Amino acid sequence: MTSTQPASPPYYESFAPSAGTRPPRARFRSDAPELDLDCTWRFRLLPRADQPTGGFEQPGFDDSGWDTLPVPAHWQLHGHGRPAYTNVSYPFPIDPPHVPDDNPTGDYRRVFDLPHDWPDGPAVLRFDGVDSCFAVWLNGTALGYSTGSRLPTEFDVAPLLRGGRNTLAVRVHQWSAASYLEDQDMWWLSGIFRDVRLLSRPAGGLDDFFLHAGYDHTTGTGTLRVDTRTSARITVEELGLFDAPAAAVHEVGPVEPWSAETPRLYHGVLATAAERVPVRIGFRTVDTSGGVLRANGRPLLLRGVNRHEWHPDSGRVLDHATMLADVLLMKQHNINAVRTSHYPPHPDFLDLCDEYGLWVIDECDLETHGFEEVGWRRNPSDDPRWGEATLERMRRMVERDKNHPSVIMWSLGNEAGTGQNLRAMAEWTRQRDPGRPIHYEGDPDSPYVDVYSRMYAPHEEVAAIGRYAEPGTADPANDAHRRALPFVLCEYAHAMGTGPGGLAEYQELFETFDRCQGGFVWEWIDHGIRRREPDGTEWFGYGGDFGEVLHDGNFVADGLLLPDRTPSPGLGELKKVYEPVRICPDPASGTVRLTNTWAFADTSGLAFLWSVTEEGVVVAEGQLAVDALPPGGSTEVPLPVPPVPATDRESWLNVRAVLGGERAWAPDGHEVAWGQAQLGSTAPRPEPAGAAPATGTEGVLTLGPGTFDSASGALRSIGGVPVSSPVALDLWRAPTDNDHAQHGISVEDQWRRLGLDRLTERRVATEMAEDGLVVRSRVAAAASDLGMLVSYTWSGDADRLLLTLDTEPDGRWPCPLPRLGVHLALPPELGAVEWFGRGPGEAYPDIQRAARVGRYTRSVDELQTPYLRPQENGNRADTRWACFRAADGTGLRVEGHPVFDFSARRWSTRALDSARHPHDLTPEDRIHLHLDLAHNGIGSASCGPGVLPQYELRPTGHRLRLAFTPLR
Ligand code: GAL
C-alpha cells in the first residue's frame, strides 16, 4: 500500500513557531541606516497553502501579471478575499495543529535597490507584524518562517544582500497552527500589516539593551542602569551623566518621576563606538507590596480602556496620526490607562504612551478562547507541544517593549484557559523582568500572577472582592495567594451600542475599596468596516456583512468610539465618571468642595471657572481663587454668589475645571471636570385655568388650542399644528444591545414574549367634563391577559393644553418596562429643537452623569446617535421644556410638570427596531416625538451585569404631566 501523506507537516502546521529567525530584542531607532520597505508590493492570492511557489521567490521571476498591494495592509480590505468576524468560535474545525486545505495564501514580491552608501556588515530584515504565518526569501534563498502576528520577526540577511538590486519574496498564509493561538474577538484579517524594514547593524553596535530607571519615593532620587550585550556608555546631560559606563548603577540624585499624570522623560544617548541610540528615560518603580498596586510608592487607580487597533478603512493597520488621535482622545477623556487588548500594539503607540502619559498593561498575542466551546479539550495552554510557541510569544513581547516606562504590567494573554504553558510564560517573565507585575485573567486560581483580575464582575461582586470576601477557590494555597493580591477589572462596562450604564457605581467602588484599583472599559472603538452604497452613502459593516457562514454579528461593535472615531455618548459619560478633580457646589453650606484625586499631579495647571445661568442663559461668571491642591487634597471654597437667586427662573451654579494653558494633549481651556448645583428651588409651573371642551363641526371637539376627534377623543392638532399620529401610550423601545444581551439574561426576550412590541389600544370611554376631556383605554398585546389601564386627562386654557397621563397595570407584570410615555407625530418641518434640561447628549437613568442642566439647540437629525446596529438612542432627560420649530419659528412647545424625557426622530420605533444599519432608516414625512416619564436603565448586559435595581422602570402606577403650547 502506498501512502500519500507528507512525511512531516508543512511549516504552517508545525508546533514550532518559527525557524531561521533572530532572538528577540528591544526595538529602538539608532544612527545606523535603515531602509523602509513599505510601499506598493507585487501580490497574488492563491486559494491554498500547498501550491508550489512556481519560482516567485527567484529574482528573475516575471511578476508583471500580478496585482499590487500596499504594505502594510490586509489583503481582505483591498479586494482579495473577504473579512470575517467571529468572537469565540474558530472559523475552521478544531483539529490542532491542522488548518483547512482552503487556506488563502498571499505571495508578495518587492524589488529594492540597496542605497550606494549602505555600509558593509551585519544587516537585519525586520517584519513588525504579519498575520498569521509567513516564509521569506531574499534573492532566491529561503531565510525561514515565522508566526506571532502582532510580534516582530527578524532575520539576519547580510550574507544574502547584494549591492544594487535585491528581491524580497514573502509567502503569507491566512491559517496556520498559530491561528489556534490567535483567537481574539476581532476580524480575521491577513497579510503584512505592519512595517517592513532593512536595518544595518554595525559590528560592535547595540544589539539590545534593557534600561532600568528606578525611583525611590522615600528619597525622591533615581537610579539608572542599562544592561547591554556590548559594553556601552550613557549620557544624560540633564542628570549630569556624561559618557558614563552604562552597566554601572548610577545614583542620579533627585529626579522628577515618570507617571501617567506627569510623564517626565529624560533624554539621553546610549552609545558604543559603532552606534548611538537616543533613549527616553522615565524614572518609575512599580510594585504590589501590601497587596496594593503602586507606582512610585502611591496606589494607582486605573481609569482604563481596552484598546484594539482599529481603523475603519485599513483594519489593524494604523498610521501614526491615528495612534496619536487615540492617545489624545484618551487623555482628553480623563482616561489614564490602556490594556493593549489582546496583543502588543504597534510599537509607536507605546512611544506615545510614554510621551503623553498612559499606564499600560501590555498583553501578549495569545488567545485560545475557541477551545472553551469544546470543554477546553486539547487547549494549547496546557499542552507541552505548544510550550515553545507560547513562551516565544511572551519573550518577543517583553524583549521588544521592556524599555517603555508606560508599560507597568505584562499580561500573558487573554482567554486562553489554564495550563502549564501559561505558568512557564509567567515564570520566565518574572525572572527576566522582576520590575513589573504579571497579569492574566483567565485562571480563577491566579497562582502565578501578581494581580487578581476579572472581567464583567457585577457591582456587588466587586464590592465583595473589595472587602476580601470573594468566594474561595479549592486550593487553600492558591486561595491565600489570590486574597493577598490587588484587584483590577481587566474588562468591565461593555460599551456595545447605547450605554454602558452603571459606570458611576463602579467608580464609587473603586474609590471606596483600596483593593479595587480600577479597571478597563471594554472597549475603545467599534471595529466597523467602512462601506459605501452606489450613491455614496457611507456605512460600517459588521459580522455577517461579508457573507460569513459563521459570525457574531455586531458584537464587534462595542466601543466608546464609533468606527470613524466619533466619541459616543458612552465616552462622554466615562469622561465625567473618570474626572480626576471632583467639584461639588453646595449652596446649602455656601461652598464649593474641590477634591484632587490625582496621585501625582497638583491642580496648579487648572483654572476653576464659575457661571450662573438662569434657565440656561449665563447671567454672571468669573474665576474662583483656588490654591493648588496637592495630590489627594481637598478644599472648600466659598460660593461666589448668593445661594438664593434674585429671580424665579431656574438658576444653576456651574463650576468647571479647565486647563489654564496649552498641554501636549489638549488646548488651553480644555474642560477636565465640572460640577453644578441648583440655586434656590423651582416653583411649580402654573397650571392652565381649565376650559370646557366645545363641540364643533364635522365631529371635531375643541379644548383650548387643541382639536380632538369627538368620537374617539384622539388629539388632531394643537393650535394649528397637525398631530398626524394621536397622542398614545408608548411602552416600547427599539431594544438596545444591552437589552438584547446575547450572552446574558435578555430583557428584550421578556419584553417580546409579553408583546410589548405589538401593543394594541382599546378605548374604554371618552368623557367630557366641565373643565376638560378624559379618554380611558386599555393597552394590551394579543394572546396576553396583561394590560395597562390608561387615562388621558386633557384640560386647557386659551394658550395651553395640559395632558395628565395616568397608567395602572392590570395584572402582574413580571419585568421592568422599556419606557413609559406617549408618542405623537408632528409635521416634518418642525425639525429645530431647543430645550432646557439635561444635555446636550443623550441620557438614560444609569448613564446621565455627563448630561448637565442647560439650554441646548439641535436639529432632529443631530439628536440621533448612529450606533452601527440601530437601536434606542438619543433620549434627552429631565427636560423642563422643549420647543420644536419650523424655519419660520412656528411650532410647538412642550412643558413638563415638572420634567419629562424626549426623543424625536424621522422614523418609527418599529423601523428603528428592524433596521440592520443606519442607512436602512428612511426618513418619513413626519417627526415621531416620544415624550416619556422615564426609560428603563441601560446596564451593560450585552456582556456584563444588567440594569441596577434603582434604575429599573417598575410596572407600577405612573403619572406624566405635559403642557403643549403652539408657537405662532
Ligand atoms: C471578553 C473578551 C473580549 C471581548 C469581550 C466582549 O470576554 O476578552 O475580547 O470578546 O469579552 O466583547
Image: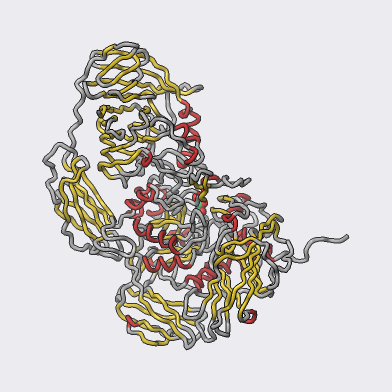
Can residue 394 be spotted in the picture? Answer: no
Q: Observer-nearest residue: 881 or 394?
A: 881
Residue 602 drawn at (x, y percent): 25, 64
Reply above or below: 151 against 568.
Answer: below
Residue 275 drawn at (x, y percent): 48, 84
Q: How is the image coloured?
A: secondary structure
Q: Quadrant of the C terminus?
A: top left
Residue 258 drawn at (x, y percent): 35, 70
Q: Observer-nearest residue: 52 or 295?
A: 52
Residue 905 left/right relative to 145: left
- In terms of image quadrants, where is residue 596? bottom left
Question: Who's the residue at 42% across and 60% down the image?
Answer: 338
Can residue 84 be spotted in the picture? Answer: yes
Residue 959 left/right relative to 131: left
Residue 150 left/right relative to 334: right
Reply above or below: 475 against 753.
Answer: below
